[in-house]
Image (tube, rainbow, N blue to C red):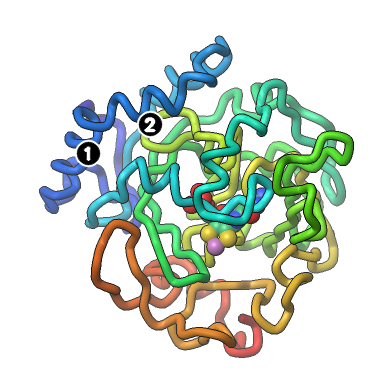
Amino acid sequence: MARNPHIIQLPRWAIPENQVTDERLFLNRRKFLTQSTLVATAAYLPMLASAKVGDLADRLSGATKTVSHNEKLTRFEDVSGYNNFYELGTDKGDPAANAEALRTDPWSISVEGECQNPGKLTFEDLIAGQTMEERIYKLRCVEAWSMIIPWSGFPLASLLKKFQPTSDAKYVSFETLYDKSRPLPGQRRNVIDWPYREGLRMDEAMHPLTFVAVGLYGKPIPNQNGAPLRLVVPWKYGFKSIKSIVKIKFTRDQPQTSWNMLAPQEYGFYSNVNPEVDHPRWSQKRERRIGELFRVRTEMLNGYAPEVAELYKGMDLQKYF
Ligand SMILES: Nc1nc2c(c(=O)[nH]1)N[C@H]1C(S)=C(S)[C@@H](COP(=O)(O)O)O[C@H]1N2
Ligand SMILES: [Mo]
């Protein structure tokens, strides 16, 4: 496998891929490359029609590869076939089945609020000049399952800095596509008060672990995983990682978030992975890796406590769940 020689002085979560000792990871990746090529190719066929996506594919294949987990990757078929994306339906198989209903080209994102450079950008403008990286992050769903996923993209901070948020920007909020005149299959029902909304405190948003994914397994991200760009906040429950973003807004006040609006006693604004704080209807102490039989213990802050625990110093995590 190609190694990037330019990796120097990486934080703990970004071990150069050639230093990972777990052979299973390599075996798993090779297996993916050989056995799953057909499946992968089929999944991307509609997208490859676009020249723009071709450019993105080239950039992703040259991405700097780092890993943050010494664990077996979740199979591509599971990562792209077992999804939560209510805009495309509420069953785990719906997003893949309805993936083509989401049209990602052209795509634009509007940036608003407390910043010096607001405006509307195309997806191409937005990713221009970003250095692509591949990072293996665990996605831990609040429903107590998890996956180990190789995402490609760049830190959210390097995107947000371009808009020059002012000192009044205490939070940043995000919205997913919602065109009332052309609702996605899942948006014909009001399971959520569309559009899907999420938000982060500014220091969480600017943290180097917070990532914008435009790729998965080295290829442009499949629609069902949130094409053309989605958030990945690895120490928070999966629902914070909003998909198919069309709006970014810098705010003074804590923004409204979809799951908190729907069930505030079950889903807090922070939603940090915490085995000590149960969901009112089930325990968060353990999780099941998709594709594995046995459950494993859930780690504090999803295993990223050394990096992010300081963001919550002095906060009562039972209260700010
Ligand atoms: N717009 C939008 N983003 C979303 C969701 C959604 O329904 N709509 N589901 C969330 C939930 S609950 C999870 S667990 C993750 C799932 O990401 P994946 O399907 O790529 O694994 O996406 C999150 N982002
Ligand atoms: Mo989730």
Residue 269: percent from the left, percent from the top? 69, 72
Image point (66%, 32%), residue name:
101
Where is the C terminus found, in terms of image quarters? bottom right
The amino acid at mark 1 is Arg
Examine the rendered structure and indicate whether residue 52 appears above or below residue 156.
Answer: above
Whether ligand 1 has any atom under 8 Å from the Cβ at mark 2 is answered as no
Residue 167 in view here: no
| Residue 267 at x, y percent in the picture | 65, 75
Q: Quadrant of residue 42?
A: top left
Dot placed on the residue nearer the N-terminal end, 2 or 1: 1
Look at 65% across and 80% down and name the residue there: 266
Q: Disc 2 and disc 1: Cα gap in Å?
A: 11 Å
Residue 274, given in percent of the width and then of the height, sits at 48, 79
Local secondary structure at mark 2:
loop
Q: Nearer the viewer, residue 197 or 49?
A: 49
Please give left or right for residue 70 compared with residue 262 in the image.
left
Measured from the top left, where is residue 288 in percent x and y? Answer: 34, 68
| Residue 293 lies in quadrant | bottom left
Who's the residue at 39% across and 39% down the image? 134
Give the label on residue 239, or none. Answer: none
The residue that mark 2 highlights is 218
Q: Work out whether residue 130 or residue 21 is closer to the camera in this orientation and state it.
A: 21
Q: Look at mark 1 in the image and give the residue it sits on.
A: 29
Hey, what amino acid is under mark 2? Gly
